[in-house]
């Protein structure tokens, strides 16, 4: 007979009297005494504890079915006679339908290939968590049955994980949590542990975490009066159609006074509905805090049978990784495969109960509501403050892009309207000027007419006109105003979300940090032992001593910490790796430059006139596309490398880890995204030489130069293609396509199942099974990173591309809904994290804003022709107009001065012999004594450019600081409300103290009167 199946731990008879044990009913007395002892054999191999520590016997439930025992209502698992999923709302509650599931732990377990399916949902009803022995596994856990020699023994690592889980879960129950296990799931090989935090645990942890909760006291929020009130009412009526239809977004006139929760002052809080006092977000946060600090340092690890010393070393290594705080290290070591809170329910379907997730999907995570405001308060209620602040910041940034886009469109339209009035473009397009230009390369290139660059010159004016200077100043002030506006919005949210007095406490040390410190401590201890006298020990004693030292690892880690000497190899690796990757980026850009030069040379010698005329367009377009592909690939590579470099540093806390990761990733991605743009803006065309003496790379490739209209047009093309391509491909297609692809792969896997399994797969799953199939939350760093890089595109080179804010606005309108849909429908629900600001990202934004002022000053001064035009207008123009500017910027070259082998092969291509040709530069003419030397005009223009950079930078910086100073960080009404809250809280406590004093006085008066009456009675009793 088969003996596989489900094993239950039999409890001693003294612990039950009615034949049942909280939902798990035991076998009748006559069957328990069955002579068939083989079916009730104790599984000695299953337990890895010493015999004197077991105290637990295993009975084989599968054997009962095999011998024909008919299960009635008094048999085991009688709770499955009814549909259990109806009571627990498909996994949102425990099996009793009363206790809400606050958190889920998921683990993998190995099941014998001979075993058959049997329902294994066994639960607690009213069992107190402290009533179980510490070594007793969770009821419902499937054990391995003695299969004689037919079943392979569970391998050592799986056994070790199982023991760790048992000890950790027992510790969670000792901390007050209630657990329920489910291994009978539609996802084979996965077990789920459901966690519920009872009321007393929630109160205790809320007090420890200093969570601000609403009290019974309600006060009136300050409302504007007079004209301001009328204006606000008009604005509310106008914006009513674009407001989300959620209760949390409605204008509030009253607010509950909040105070850190205290069990001694529960009378202050409204506890009429305890089930809703702590919402699901708060409950999961509390449970996660318990999971982080619950230890797994007392587990009794088994060495197995005949495993040898290698197992001992492996065990110690695993034990060291366990760390001081359990869940992070257990997840890292694979003891649990996932840990997450549950979503509130389904978000689509006809008969879906109303819940916050469904409401968010309808009013927030839908492209049809792109024109509406975000329900930020509901987002915070469901996902927590940190994610709420991200979407609030993204919303403010998108709103602020509206005026920037409008001004950018006006600047662009101004360029379009004045293109026919631009004198330099008109002169360049006038064929009557008959200006003959020098060859652009040696030998293969010939002479050409300046009028052939007419289209490029006219297009350059669209972005290179006096309005772009104004737009650069405007965008610098816009960035400062945006930062101030966000600070004020952040303070309003802090007040509304009761975060005004919140201070982030020091995080728990990371599991990797604890492991590293423990390793250092053990290494130092072993060195000290080697110095001392060595005493002979038996092998068993050595093992016992080593285990004791490991168990004392927590105490060792409290004494030690990692110094810069310990981290020096990691720091050196970081420095070398970052320098190497920056060098790699420069090398790739240099390779693209070589491609541009070689392709331009190859097309220039083409015999077809069409190929010659489209050389610049073809080379520029293909090179930018190559740059875009390289940027997208390197972005992903650099993100992985930045995480690895941060991991080897072993930061102490999660906050420190996140900040270091952000800094490295931003540095690498910034260099990767902007290096090609920096090259075009500041280096291209600066070191080209002159006709007959051009500068060559590797003696073969001539340095490329800008178009006759300047480099600003090419900078605009480069910036627009990289920005739009990066947003379209990386930010949108990847975010949409990759999750859809993963979902499609899961669907294909489900269709490959056997017909029976496929039908089972299509049945309604439990909530925790559905959420397990969602993608895990990877943090907000990728979301912030793509927006910060976009902010750089909008501000750093805005002088060359006034339409950048418009394209950023259109992208963000889609990005908000795309991110919302991803958070609501495609990701597991993240653990809510309290935060009062956006952290290090604010400092990065300020840095980018300051850098934008400097870069735009250099773009206007050195990349555009704005300064040369001003110099010509006020110093050299005879008529006081721009007539003659083009001729002024072109130098003369005598073709007889060509060096041997550099003259064009076809000197008669234009149909006439050329004696003098022109090229764009400020050099002395050939008839001068210092021919082809730098002219005085060049130095005059250079001085003007440097002066403009200094004046522009200081002026705009001063104006930005002035905006920063004039706008207060905290709105006046919010500061008044915060002060009002403090006054009201003092009044509440004063009234409470007065009530206590009055109560004591009344009680004391009664005692005095009672004492006086007793004295009189005693006196009268003494009288005769």
Image (cartoon, rainbow, N blue to C red):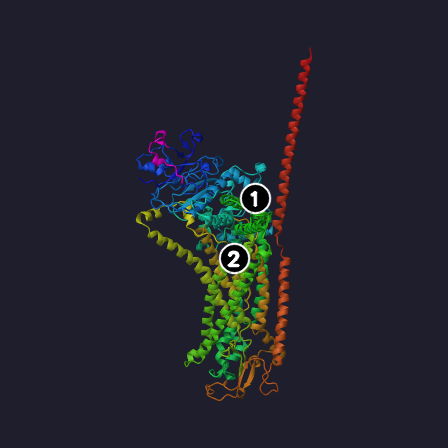
Residue 685 in view in this figure? yes
Q: Disc 2 to disc 1, how far (Cα)?
A: 28 Å
On the picture, is 332 further left or further right than 1007? left
On the picture, is 147 further left or further right than 436? left
Nearest to the observer: residue 466 or residue 620:
620
Any mark on residue 417, and which?
Answer: none
> Could you tell me which quadrant the C terminus lies in?
top right
Question: Which residue has dot 1 on it?
Answer: 209
Residue 278: percent from left, percent from top? 51, 42
Q: Residues in magenta?
A: 27-44
- Tag 1 or tag 2, which sits nearer the N-term? 1
Going by the picture, which residue comes out furthest to the top? 1024
Residue 655: percent from left, percent from top? 55, 52
Does the segment drawn in magenta span residue 29?
A: yes
Residue 624: percent from left, percent from top? 47, 69
Nearest to the observer: residue 54 or residue 162:
54
Question: In what element is the residue under mark 2?
Answer: helix
Nearest to the observer: residue 581 or residue 943:
581
Does the segment drawn in magenta span residue 651?
A: no
Question: Which residue has dot 2 on it?
Answer: 784
Residue 292 in view in this figure? no
Q: Quadrant of residue 845?
A: bottom right
């Amino acid at each position: 007979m088969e003996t596989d199946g489900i094993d239950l731990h039999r409890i001693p008879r003294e612990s039950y009297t009615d034949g049942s044990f909280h939902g798990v009913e035991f076998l009748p007395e006559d069957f328990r005494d069955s002579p068939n002892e083989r079916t009730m054999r104790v599984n000695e191999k299953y337990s890895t504890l010493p015999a004197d520590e077991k105290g637990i016997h295993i009975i084989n439930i599968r054997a009962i079915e095999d011998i024909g025992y008919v299960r009635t209502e008094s048999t085991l698992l009688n709770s499955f006679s009814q549909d259990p999923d109806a009571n627990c709302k498909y996994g949102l509650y425990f099996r009793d339908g009363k206790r809400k599931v606050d958190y889920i732990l998921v683990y993998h377990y190995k099941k014998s290939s001979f075993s058959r399916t049997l329902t294994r949902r066994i639960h607690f009803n009213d069992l107190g968590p402290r009533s179980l022995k510490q070594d007793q596994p969770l009821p419902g856990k499937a054990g391995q049955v003695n299969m004689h020699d037919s079943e392979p023994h569970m391998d050592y690592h799986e056994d070790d994980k199982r023991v760790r889980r048992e000890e950790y879960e027992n510790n969670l129950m000792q901390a007050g949590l209630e657990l329920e296990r489910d291994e009978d799931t539609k996802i084979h090989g996965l077990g789920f542990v459901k966690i519920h935090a009872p009321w007393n645990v929630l109160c205790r942890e809320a007090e420890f975490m200093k969570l601000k909760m609403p009290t019974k006291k309600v006060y009136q929020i300050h409302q504007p009066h007079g004209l301001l009130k009328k204006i606000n009412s008009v604005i509310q009526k106008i914006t009513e159609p674009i407001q989300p239809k959620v209760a949390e977004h409605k204008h509030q006139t009253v607010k509950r006074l909040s105070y850190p929760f205290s069990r001694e002052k529960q009378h202050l809080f409204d506890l009429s509905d305890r089930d809703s006092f702590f919402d699901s977000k708060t409950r999961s946060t509390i449970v996660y805090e318990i999971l982080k600090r619950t230890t797994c340092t007392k587990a009794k690890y088994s060495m197995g049978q005949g495993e040898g010393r290698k197992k001992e070393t492996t065990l110690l290594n695993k034990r060291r990784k366990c760390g001081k705080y359990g869940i992070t290290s257990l997840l890292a070591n694979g003891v649990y495969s996932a840990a997450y809170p549950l979503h509130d329910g389904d978000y689509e379907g006809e008969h879906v109960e109303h819940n916050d997730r469904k409401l968010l999907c309808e009013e927030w995570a839908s492209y049809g509501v792109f024109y509406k405001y975000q329900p930020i308060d509901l987002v915070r209620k469901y996902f927590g403050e940190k994610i709420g602040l991200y979407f609030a910041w993204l919303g403010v940034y998108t709103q602020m892009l509206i005026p920037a886009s409008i001004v950018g469109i006006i600047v662009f339209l101004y360029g379009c309207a004045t293109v026919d009035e631009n004198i330099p473009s008109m002169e360049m397009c006038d064929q009557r000027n008959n200006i003959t230009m020098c060859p652009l390369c040696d030998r293969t290139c010939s002479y050409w007419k300046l009028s052939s660059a007419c289209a490029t010159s006219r297009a350059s004016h669209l972005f290179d006109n006096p309005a772009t200077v104004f737009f650069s100043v405007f965008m610098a002030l816009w960035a400062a105003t945006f930062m101030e506006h966000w600070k004020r919005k952040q303070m309003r949210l802090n007040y509304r979300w009761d975060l005004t007095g919140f201070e982030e406490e020091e995080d728990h040390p990371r599991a990797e940090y604890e492991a590293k410190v423990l390793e250092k401590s053990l290494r130092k201890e072993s060195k000290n032992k080697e110095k001392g006298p060595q005493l002979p020990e038996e092998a068993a004693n050595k093992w016992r001593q080593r285990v004791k030292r490991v168990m004392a690892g927590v105490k060792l880690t409290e004494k030690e910490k990692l110094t810069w000497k310990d981290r020096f190899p990691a720091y050196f690796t970081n420095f070398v790796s970052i320098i190497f990757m920056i060098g790699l980026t420069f090398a790739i850009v240099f390779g693209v430059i070589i491609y541009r030069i070689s392709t331009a040379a190859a097309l220039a010698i083409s015999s077809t006139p069409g190929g010659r005329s489209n050389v610049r367009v073809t080379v520029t377009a293909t090179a930018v596309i190559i740059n875009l592909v390289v940027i997208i690939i390197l972005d992903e590579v650099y993100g992985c490398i930045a995480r690895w470099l941060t991991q080897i540093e072993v930061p102490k806390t999660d906050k420190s880890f996140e900040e270091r990761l952000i800094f490295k990733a931003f540095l690498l991605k910034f260099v990767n995204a902007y290096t090609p743009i920096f090259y075009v803006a500041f280096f291209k065309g600066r070191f080209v030489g002159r006709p007959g003496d051009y500068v060559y790379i590797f003696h073969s490739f001539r340095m490329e130069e800008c178009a006759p209209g300047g480099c600003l047009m090419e900078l605009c093309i480069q910036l627009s293609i990289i920005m739009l391509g990066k947003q379209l491909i990386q930010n949108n297609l990847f975010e949409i396509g990759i999750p859809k692809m993963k979902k499609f792969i899961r669907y294909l896997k489900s269709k490959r199942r056997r017909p029976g399994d496929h039908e089972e797969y299509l049945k309604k799953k439990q909530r925790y099974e559905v959420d397990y199939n969602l993608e895990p939350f990877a943090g907000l760093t990728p979301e912030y990173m793509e927006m910060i890089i976009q902010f750089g595109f909008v501000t750093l080179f805005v002088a060359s591309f006034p339409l950048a804010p418009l394209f950023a606005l259109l992208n963000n309108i889609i990005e908000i809904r795309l991110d919302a849909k991803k958070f609501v429908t495609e990701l597991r629900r993240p653990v809510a994290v309290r935060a009062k600001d956006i952290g290090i990202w604010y400092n990065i934004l300020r840095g980018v804003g300051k850098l934008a002022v400097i870069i735009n000053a250099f773009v206007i001064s050195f990349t555009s022709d704005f300064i040369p035009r001003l110099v010509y207008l006020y110093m050299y123009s005879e008529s006081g107009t721009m007539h003659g500017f083009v001729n002024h910027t072109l130098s003369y070259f005598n073709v007889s001065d060509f060096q041997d082998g550099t003259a064009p092969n076809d000197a008669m291509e234009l149909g006439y012999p050329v004696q003098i040709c022109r090229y764009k530069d400020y050099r002395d003419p050939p008839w001068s004594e210092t021919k082809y030397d730098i002219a005085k005009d060049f130095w005059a223009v250079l001085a003007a450019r440097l002066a403009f950079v200094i004046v522009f930078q200081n002026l705009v910086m001063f104006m930005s600081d002035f905006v920063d100073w004039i706008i207060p960080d905290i709105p006046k009404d919010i500061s008044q409300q915060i002060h009002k809250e403090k006054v009201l809280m003092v009044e509440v406590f004063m009234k409470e103290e007065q009530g206590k004093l009055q109560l004591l006085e009344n009680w004391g008066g009664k005692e005095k009167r009672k004492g006086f009456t007793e004295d009189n009675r005693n006196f009268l009793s003494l009288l005769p």
